Image (cartoon, rainbow, N blue to C red):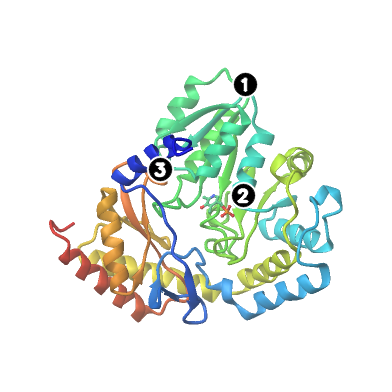
Amino acid sequence: MRQRYEWLETEWSKMREQSLCREWQTVESLAEHGGTWIVVGGKKLLNMSSNNYLGLAHDPQIMAAGEKAARQWGAGGTASRLVLGNYPLYDELEQRLARWKQREEALVFANGYQANTGVLAALAGRGDVVFSDRLNHASIVDGIVLSRAEHVRYRHNDWEHLAFLMEKHQGTKRKWIVTDSVFSMDGDKAPLLELIKLRERYGAFLMVDEAHAGGVRGERGQGLCHELGIASQVDVLMGTFSKAFGVYGAYVCADQVVIRHLRSKARSLIYSTALPPGVVGSTIAALTQIEADEWRRQALQHNAQLFRRLLAEKGFAVTSDDTQIVPITLGENERALQFSQKLWERGVAAVAIRPPTVPDGTARIRFTVMATHQPEELVWAVEQLTAVRDECAGGM
Ligand SMILES: *Cc1c(COP(=O)(O)O)cnc(C)c1O
């Protein structure tokens, strides 16, 4: 019997050698309202690894809306939406999403992973080709695999490479281009204006994942496509409620004919229980605040600029982007882990990101800024970062 899981033991030792074993920490309490400070192992830490960009996850109104919906409709979704698991709340959320995004219809999924896998598998198929940015989120990659379409990866944000590959695939039935709008581990933005041109030139379909831009970019937080004024030319706009919304779930907005198809064909929607009513109630309340609270987006933008500027002043290699995701690339896995550990000891929680989440040799610390961080907290964090860099042999 001791031999039963030998291959897992072997794999685990290999992973350990490469510093690829993963563990999680338990957040014992939220030291301050808004979740910018957390307590782990009895230690108070500034949270710089949260996707709760606008601080909405702990907003009293949003939490209360969830509680109210749970009391009225129950704790669970009880069934798939297609099997009497659909409540007025879901319809209300979808109508509001469609209006917010200025698209014909919207469809809510249980989470972003299910949205991407469900949508891609339902819309692309054998004989089609899906062109996907090399740094796209894993849920997009898995969706393409499920679709059975040909999977062609283009170099990150390199639309010329994409154009070259599309030219080579002129003969295919249907062509899809899929991209994140703001990339989750790099904090840079897709060249959406160029992708729109390629969509036109090759009669392709375009799907954009706004997970890190929804709530954050655009005049009412609709995302980067709206900020650029191209939302009506994107076939499928996808986004999540798990990041800036501070809740859970995901959505796609598209033409009615597309949404109708997805409602009957997206397997991750059909064969999975509807979101709990409380989650939907909170999401509706979060959408209200996202549409109204321009100050949150401004505070986030201000903090992101400040953090980037302070890092650059201290000689860190930060990119010229303007997003709330700020990676510091360290290279080796072990190095990123040590750096994160040292920051932790100094009171800054910022998690090391390793392959396969990022390409080999580009392990990094992914810092995320929140609207609710105080500027002086960011100044202090950069001081800690600088001290850790100076401690680490060899500089950076
Ligand atoms: C987080 C993320 C997802 C997955 O969303 P969940 O709701 O957490 O499942 C999808 N795409 C991108 C780009 C993401 O960053």
- Which kind of residue does numbered mark 1 sit on? Gly
Given this view, does label 1 or label 3 mark the residue nearer the observer? 3
Describe residue 79's horizontal placement relative to residue 127 as left or right.
Answer: right
Q: Is residue 101 left or right of residue 167?
A: right
User: How far apart in space, not on screen, are marks 1 and 2 (Cα)?
Assistant: 24 Å
Mark found first going from the N terminus, 1 or 3: 1
Q: Looking at numbered disc 3 in the image, what kind of residue is underneath it? A: Pro
Q: Residue at x 75, y 54 (%)?
A: 274
Q: Nearer the viewer, residue 374 or 51?
A: 51
Q: Is residue 184 above or below residue 157?
A: below
Say what secondary structure mark 1 lies in: loop
Q: Quadrant of residue 78?
A: bottom right
Image quadrant where residue 43 sits: bottom left
Q: Residue furthest top?
A: 171
Q: Indicate which disc, 1 or 2, sits on the residue closer to the N terminus.
A: 1
Which disc, if any, is residue 127?
A: 1
Q: Position of residue 232 (x, y in %)?
A: 64, 47
- The residue lying at 15 percent from left, 58 percent from top is 395
Ligand 1 neighbours mark 2 (CB distance < 8 Å): yes
Disc 3 target residue: 356
Q: Is residue 196 visible?
A: no
Which three-letter amino acid code belongs to the residue tagged 2?
Met
Residue underneath mark 2: 238
Q: Which residue sits furthest right?
A: 84
